[in-house]
Amino acid sequence: MGNKTGTQKQKDMITSTIVFDHRMRTAQGMEGPLEVRVTANRKPYYIQTGVRVRANQWQFDKVVNHPQANALNERLGILLDKIMCIVNKCIENGQDIDIASVRRQAWQTVHKQTAIEWMRNEVTQMPVSYGTMKHYKSAIKRLEEFGRMTDWPDFTSANIYAFDAFIRMNVQGRYAHIAIGTAYNYHKCLKALLSRAEKSELIAINPYNRLRGEFARGDKPSTEYLTEEEMSKIQKFSPAPGSFMERARNLFIFQMFTGLSFSDMMAFDISEYKKVKGKWCIIASRIKTGVPYVNQLLPPAVDVLERYDMTLPKMTNQVYNRELKLLGMACGITIPLHSHLARHTFATFMLRNGAKIENVSRMLGHTNIKQTQRYAKVLAESVHEDFDKIEQLLKKKKV
């Protein structure tokens, strides 16, 4: 055979494939990015595909065990073919291969979605609970109603300020008194989606990075929790055997002594725990945030599990909270019971009994210790109340 031409040699030195999370930054069990790896002259370049799956869902160069496997594989195939078509055209024209240009051309051709369309599709691939999914969909709906950020160049700091003003308006164009937390959650969801868009190289930078602290949640006026006396009332109360209230009571006790959120509790599986010195222990990641947490089952939690052969009964969040309200009234507790109150109660119970705040933060899977410090603030207020009682008592004795 004769010598190969320069163009043919260059073609032989170009390869492409799709790889999972080449930076190896994805935590176990979480979704990671699929990227096209183009190797030119032995140098690898990576192009985001916009597809994220778990490690066990990427096998033999295909997406498997995924509800949208066929659609995702078709999308990946089109993108890979388009990239190689652009690269080969560069070679045939004797041009240098500019990966940034290849990336831009491929995305413009294959991904013709608007930003909002992309967000709707992206949300379906996010590993979040049903409740959190509803928050994301609500934020996207408000974004669509806003109408000024439909494509990627529209996402500017100025437009985000305008969006903030919009979500605080009512239909008559006047400022509505929506909860601070509601506005915060809209921004939180949008920021997370734009962060994923940035990782997929759809936008150069997340505009929220320039607006740190601008749309804060604000401090809640107080954090409610149950006292140990109220906790005891729930433990001693006996609803009708087999009733919804009995299940709700047992689940609430389990939450009070584990600190698990409702979604993490519903996903509870004892097989994921290990026995360490006779104690059930686990290091896992929260479903809602992916933040790691440490858990060890305390005796009241184990008692609940033993009632159900080491499993937990299943309930919808709606039914659970309905039964908790009835349970609270039956126990004579004035604070309305709800699933997250058990998590607050766990935190204050642990701190009250000497647990270090740094450890409680890890137990709860908080993203930073500031989230846990509000419970310490509640305890400080309780201490001051005791001081006030003693002061009044001393005054009476003096009289």
Image (cartoon, rainbow, N blue to C red):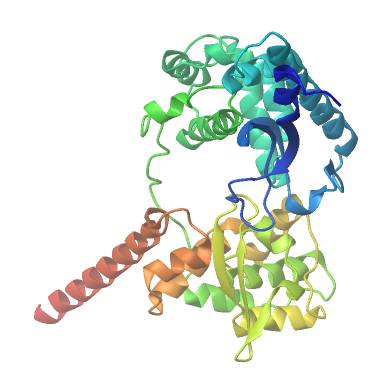
Image coords of residue 308 (percent x, y): 81, 78
Quarter of the image containing the C terminus? bottom left
Image coords of residue 206 (percent x, y): 48, 27
Closer-to-camera residue (64/182) = 64
Quarter of the image containing the N terminus? top right
Work out which residue is located at the far front of the displayed protein and give it: 2
Quadrant of the rendered structure where residue 350 is? bottom left
Q: Is residue 29 left or right of residue 311?
A: left
Q: Can the viewer see residue 113 in this picture?
A: no
Q: Can the viewer see residue 12 in this picture?
A: yes
Where 373 sits versus 391, above or below? above
Quadrant of the rendered structure where residue 253 is? bottom right
Work out which residue is located at the far left of the displayed protein and give it: 398
Residue at horizontal 30 percent and vertical 62 percent from the top: 381
Closer-to-camera residue (59/241) = 59
Closer-to-camera residue (131/292) = 292
Residue at horizontal 87 percent and vertical 29 percent from the top: 74
Where 44 sits versus 383, above or below? above
Image coords of residue 177 (percent x, y): 47, 26
Quadrant of the rendered structure where residue 248 is? bottom right
Where 102 sits versus 354, above or below? above
Work out which residue is located at the far bottom of the displayed protein and give it: 277
Q: Is residue 161 left or right of residue 62?
A: left
Residue at horizontal 73 percent and vertical 61 percent from the top: 266
Image coords of residue 159 (percent x, y): 47, 14
Closer-to-camera residue (101/34) = 101
Total labels drawn:
0
